[in-house]
Image (spheres, helix red, strand yellow):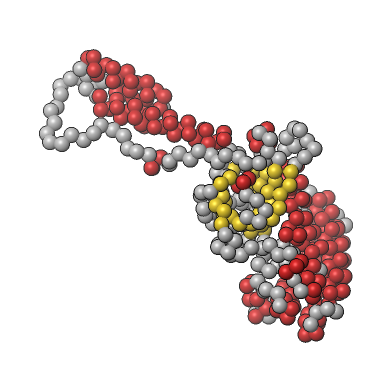
Amino acid sequence: MTLPPPSRPRPPWQQPSYGPPAVPGPQMVSSAPVSGFAIASLVCSLVCLAPLGLVFGIIALVRTSRRGERGKGLAVAGVAVSGAVLVLAFLMLVGALRFSAWSSGSPAGPVRGDRGTSVFALETGDCFTPATVPTQDNQGSIRNGTAERLPCEEPHRGEIYGSFELTGQEAFPGPEEIMKTSRDRCGVLLPDYAVDLTAHGPLQTYFYYPDQAGWERGGRTVLCWAGAPRGDLDASIRKEESAFEPAQFAYVSAFRPLWEAQLRAPQREPEEDLAAASRWAGQMAAAYAEAARLLGDARGGLPGDVRGPAGEIVMVFEAAVPHWEQAARAADSDAFLAAIEQADRDNDLTVGLDAEIRKGVGLPVAESAAAGREEGV
């Protein structure tokens, strides 16, 4: 689906100035009365009553010509300003009606780029910087849905890693239902696109999806993209199995169950929806158990000097399982959060161990992980 970008009128401070032209030299002072309609026209144009200002200005122009009243310059200014305000309002309305797209995401970095194409013209593998970067509070329609497509080797805000079509429903299912579907389906696409999700440090997933107006125009496409929680990426996150040696692939694949479970984390707090949080905790318990098993199997194929750190990560994962299971059975949100805190207490330890293993098998180490390793984390 390709939606046209909004019309982009110039902001008020870039609008041309209006008013009577300056007359050089001395000017004759007229004793004729000033037209009341001319004064009213200018005043109305300045207090956001543009329609009245336009009408009064036209009347004043007629009266000054016929009756010899002063104030023609005021009338011209009133008509000009009122007309400019009305044109600007019309352009803004047209822009709002021509494009509207929903997005959802988490805190993001600076906005950069304000040209290019509609975000829905982007394809899997495209690196880009959107004109409007989604934030946690951005739950409304995007008014500027353009994006600047960029080479992945240059700094860019995000990368499209997949898309899918919303099918099976004629009526608009509502934003909550679309967002739930988008989180689930986008989550499982990322590990196939970026086999090694930790190579670039923490990643945040986002997606674009049609709102009701877009749905009524036939929009059904959801675009899944990823970016850094803050700032830009400077390389593509795309990496397939063929790019790895067997020991490298076995190691990074061991973490896939955890990535997939984490990407399905509920958006609501446990105080708001304990049942959803409990289901996710059960998924996390199973993911930690499976990751421990896969990493234990991969450990034998690793170089001898990093088998010890790999074994330590296995023990951390196995120790986390009962705490996640306890969270899944929690009677209230306080008990849930307490169990989660226990489950995560050794996660910082695994960052340093993972950096050590990655260096040993020839995998890239994210700057944040390398810093933690040097500090003994």
Could you tell me which residue is drawn at 66 percent across and 56 percent down?
125
Please state which of residues 99 and 106 is positioned toward the viewer in this rendering.
99
Image quarter of residue 108: bottom right
Q: Residue furthest bottom?
A: 305
In the image, 93: left or right of 43? right
Please state which of residues 190 and 20 is positioned toward the viewer in this rendering.
190
The image quadrant where one finds the C terminus is: bottom right
Q: Which residue lies furthest to the front in this view?
A: 242
Could you tell me which residue is drawn at 86 percent across and 66 percent down?
290
Image coordinates of residue 247 in percent, x first then y, are: 79, 75
Image quarter of residue 252: bottom right
Could you tell me which residue is drawn at 44 percent across and 34 percent down?
88
In the image, 85: left or right of 325? left
Image coordinates of residue 277 in percent, x first then y, are: 80, 54
- Number of labels in the image equals 0
In the image, 80: left or right of 361? left
**Image vertical order of residue 259 relative to residue 18, above or below:** below
Could you tell me which residue is drawn at 15 percent across and 36 percent down?
24
The image quadrant where one finds the N terminus is: top right
Image coordinates of residue 234 in percent, x first then y, are: 58, 65
Residue 15 visible in the current orientation: yes
**Image vertical order of residue 278 relative to residue 74, above or below:** below
**Image vertical order of residue 371 relative to residue 10, above or below:** below
Image coordinates of residue 239 in percent, x first then y, are: 71, 65
Residue 344 visible in the current orientation: no
